[in-house]
Amino acid sequence: MDSPTHSYGVKRCSPGVFFLWTLPWLGILAWGGLSAVLCLWKGLNQTNMSNVFAFALWIVFDLAVIALGAGAFFTGFLTYIVGKKELKDIINAAVIIGFICYSGAMAMLGIDIGQPLRGWFIFWHANVHSMLVEVSFCITCYLMVLTIEFIPIILENRTLQKVRELRLFGHNLHEIMAVFAATGTFLSFFHQGSLGGMFGVMYARPFAARGGFYIWPWTFFLFVLSAIAAGPLFTILCTKLTEFITRKKLVPDQAVQSLAKISAWLLSLYLVFKFIDTLGWANSLVPKAGLRFMDFYREGPYGFWMVVAELGICGILPAVILMIPKVRQQQGWLIFAGLLTCAGIVLNRFVFIIVTLAIPVMPFDRFWSYLPTWQEWGVGLAVVGYGFLLFSAAYRYLPVFPKEPELNPAAD
């Protein structure tokens, strides 16, 4: 039995079917909840983090979801500031995905700091010389912006629309959404960049240290570029997954292709600067540290294959696919390129967070290994379960895809 719960009256599956769909994601969330309770109750000894690996699996998840969630601010920038009107058909999905990524990242950080009740120390006793303080301020403020952007979507629920005051409030928020899009772009630019810049100024770690422009290392700009290249593609992937599961057309091809084309150019630009950065680092900073390029890949599982995987398989290959219109327009190739790009960005964050700390920096030092505990995996994967649950609920009860009725007339 179908249930018309959508604001536009589009039918959805029965409550029983929807409940069965949520069970695996609730299970993952329960695993994460148990892991979080153990970490907060017994301490971070539930993890394999140490003085060497102060940044570990949680921060890999954190930086990865923040990069993939960049589709929210960049799609908003293209829609409301640049004027790409066709992207209004996908902007709601981008906002919800961004909200999931940023709220999930904030929840993980609450576990990571060990004493979340003292999290306000970051703001009240701010270290003005720390990039992480600037990141904390920007991420917190941008999550507030995403919440404000999410509210009008919630208020378009069919039941809430019956309340005149809520309907007018949501309409007025829509009218000034460009202001929040511009604010989100400003905040996101700096926190995406500072996450990369933090590694670039780690001069005691030659693997990560970089030169730069004025006070900003090159990694500042590379992290911004990689995020705005991968974020929109992640939004497309989530949309295509929803279409596959629901067996419905949800977003017009024009919006998808427009976003994919922009991502193709940004990914290509990112790869050009990434190769320049890598060559400059290998031929300048590394010799100055008394090392050779291959010294960083001679121990442990982190061999030269990671460079090939990140820049070649997950970089050049998807960029070529996305740059060719006839290939990009084929759904299979588009999804394949999107998956490779997102995997490459996650690998990039993993390299900067884990490999940077694992590689010896002194002649008498040794290679350090790290293997996450099940509690760490639980907290990290809880974001995935939370994301599926929230996006599923949003799709069921809210007008996430405004063109759905028009694209699926027979389903009404």
Image (cartoon, grey):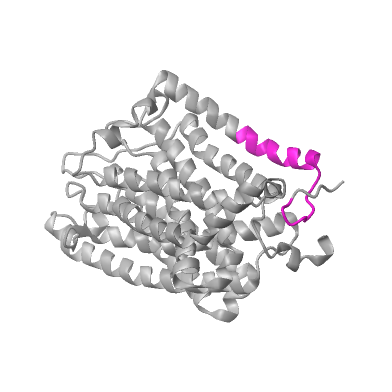
Magenta segment main secondary structure: helix
* Residue positioned most to the top: 42
Give the x, y percent position of residue 127.
Answer: 21, 39
Rendered position, 226 above or below 257: above
Q: Residue at x 38, y 51 (%)?
A: 349
Q: Residue at x 31, y 30 (%)?
A: 50
* Residue positioned most to the right: 1
Quarter of the image with the C terminus in it: bottom right
Q: Is residue 155 left or right of residue 265?
A: right
Give the x, y percent position of residue 138.
Answer: 34, 48
Q: Residue at x 26, y 49 (%)?
A: 198
Rendered position, 401 above or below 161: below
Q: Quadrant of residue 393?
A: top right
Give the x, y percent position of residue 251.
Answer: 65, 66
Instruction: Assess whether residue 24 is covered by the magenta stretch.
Output: yes
User: Number of numbered discs present?
Assistant: 0
Q: Is residue 97 left or right of residue 143?
A: right
Q: Is residue 302 visible?
A: no
* Residue positioned most to the front: 164
Q: Is residue 338 visible?
A: yes
**Looking at this view, is 140 or 297 the one in front?**
140
Q: Is residue 359 left or right of residue 405?
A: left
Q: Quadrant of residue 60?
A: top left
Magenta span of residues: 6-28
Q: Is residue 108 left or right of residue 411?
A: left
Give the x, y percent position of residue 266.
Answer: 42, 70
Instruction: Assess whether residue 391 is covered by the magenta stretch.
Output: no
Q: Residue at x 43, y 66 (%)?
A: 315
